[in-house]
Image (tube, rainbow, N blue to C red):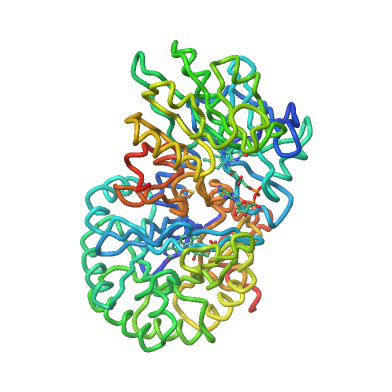
Amino acid sequence: MVNLGFSIGDLRFRNPVLTASGTFGYGSEFDDFMDVSRLGGIVVKGTTLEPREGNPYPRMAETPSGMLNSVGLQNKGIDYFGKYIYPRISEYDTNVIVNVNGSYVDDYVALAERLNSFDRIPAIELNISCPNVKMGGMAFGTNLGSAREVTRAVRAVYMKKLIVKLSPNVTNIVDFALAVEEEGADAVSLINTLLGMVVDVKRMKPALSTITGGLSGPAVRPVALRMVWQVARAVKIPVIGMGGIMNTDDALQFILAGASAIQVGTASFIDPLASVKILEGIEKYLTDKGISDISDIKGYINR
Amino acid sequence: MAKRIESLTVTDNHRLNSEYFILTLLSPGTLPEMKPAQFAQVRVEGSPDTFLRRPISIHDADRENNTIRLLVQILGKGTETLSRLRQGDQLNIIYPLGNSFSMPLKGQKLLLAGGGCGIAPLLFMAKYLREKGFNIDFLLGFRNRDRVIEYEEYSSLGKVFLTTEDGSMGEKGFLTDHPVLKENRYEQVYCCGPEPMMKAVASWCRMTGAACEVSLENLMGCGIGACLCCVVDTVRGNLCTCIDGPVFNINDLKW
Ligand SMILES: Cc1cc2nc3c(=O)[nH]c(=O)nc-3n(C[C@H](O)[C@H](O)[C@H](O)COP(=O)(O)OP(=O)(O)OC[C@H]3O[C@@H](n4cnc5c(N)ncnc54)[C@H](O)[C@@H]3O)c2cc1C
Ligand SMILES: Cc1cc2nc3c(=O)[nH]c(=O)nc-3n(C[C@H](O)[C@H](O)[C@H](O)COP(=O)(O)O)c2cc1C
Ligand code: FES
């Protein structure tokens, strides 16, 4: 038996494969294809205090080996989540993590406070890196002072595990990782999408209604991997890596570079089974190499 | 109606004209239950430029032989790659996806209206309705005579009224210019095609009081309700074309 588990403090994950927020719905979208409970965890859609309609269509454009999106945090708000989604999602035998968003620090705080009482949600992922909203989002994640402020404020009210999701749209992501670690984050996850754009030459217009959007998929992977490597060397808390992970090899690159766990995002659109295939692949890799614990290869390239 | 991911074998790739072809795909198992207007998310292998799956309607299903047919219009890289598939090739699809056209009431006068690749789901719908004993009329629009496809196929299921933009076959003009719309009192219209066409049909229906359902072709990221990229603005807020649609009643749309 190979030990695939990892921990954030005393919160145990049975394996290092999670799904990325905004790419796996609330899990149920994938029930027809797989047993969601096999995953180490699922991070649900970006959630806000109040319902949000998101940005106007079109909010997606395909790019070489990737896609741009400007969904803009469409969700029905925390009340709806608590009433209709939480009961159902609680049935999964895995760690369900809520991706927390807001326009102001107070929104994040109020939402995190509410989530304290959701017994089956052992952690939140603080999204200070959404590039697709006018207020909040990336504005917090690209300014050191704001990143500190929102992390500190949420840390003060949130009792369980606090993961802070970092934006790659900064000059030095390590500064941000260190800052949120200092303010009490239990883990960091990275990267959120890279700000990009596409122009539709035929229509002579931007492809997205918002002009710019967030780039994801294998196109961003080398950048994401570099950032994960940099951050993992700098912080003591666990690092959850993501960005263009499509298969086992990709996932292992992040772990070898220092990530404790990974999230599968855009890959689930192309192959809804990507996450479980990666899980099986990692197990096989370790077995084939005669390695009994995944922690033995975490950050291996730095040794 | 569980969704599944499956690799099907191409048993035929039939070229209709410079722009359209029909793929026949054999399922390795028994076909799932499928309803008219449902679609498949088709994986186009081989290029970083066809990263996402392509949504294509179920054009036809043959339960006896476990085959489905897809009617595809070559538009860009993905559909161009699909047009080059050969007998024996594998095609990975996720299906069946989306909702479906609703059933008409007994005795209603029905019209199936479409243009371009939007006629694809109408064949499946027509066969479905015929099985249930309904009579149907088709109103199909094409650019010109050379672009008219599958005329015989549709004619075998109902009366076909045609328009071409240049008048080289059928009536000249757009769908809504066809005199059959004045001569008949259609009560339920099912429509799929380019958005301007669907909007024109929708406004005709509003004017005459006919009930109307349209099948939308929004851009899709996932096709399974996970990405929220395919939304359409409705009276109930943004809804996903992939799971709440592709079929919408025009009364729900802000057209
Ligand atoms: C539910 C649904 C059912 C569909 N059924 C069929 C079908 O049965 N047969 C068929 O031929 N097509 C169908 N389509 C449309 C089909 O998905 C697109 O034509 C296809 O994805 C284009 O891929 P491509 O790589 O060839 O073109 P791309 O290279 O991706 O695009 C070429 C050009 O077409 C535009 N374009 C691409 N997709 C769309 C779209 N959905 N709406 C508007 N503009 C678009 C692009 O912006 C670009 O300018 C359906 C779409 C949906 C959502
Ligand atoms: C359609 C879409 C929606 C997303 N929504 C969110 C979100 O609500 N919150 C968030 O933190 N990240 C969101 N993301 C970012 C992903 O969680 C992930 O960080 C990013 O896509 C990089 O990983 P990938 O390349 O594996 O997709 C979204 C990404 C996509 C493609
Ligand atoms: S295409 Fe992803 S939600 Fe509809």
In the image, B55: left or right of B136? right
Q: Is residue A142 above or below residue B43?
A: below
Residue visible at 53% across and 66% down?
Answer: A242
In the image, A286: left or right of B83? left
Percent position of residue A9, x then y = 38, 70
Figure label count: 0
Viewer-side residue, B193 vs A41 = B193
Screen quadrant of the N terminus of chain B: top left
Percent position of residue A248, x then y = 63, 56
The residue at the far top in this view is B133
Asked whether residue A134 is in view, the answer is: yes
Percent position of residue B211, x then y = 35, 30
Q: Is residue B29 above or below residue B249?
A: above
Viewer-side residue, A250 vs A40 = A250
Q: Is residue A18 above or below residue B193?
A: below
Viewer-side residue, A296 vs A11 = A11
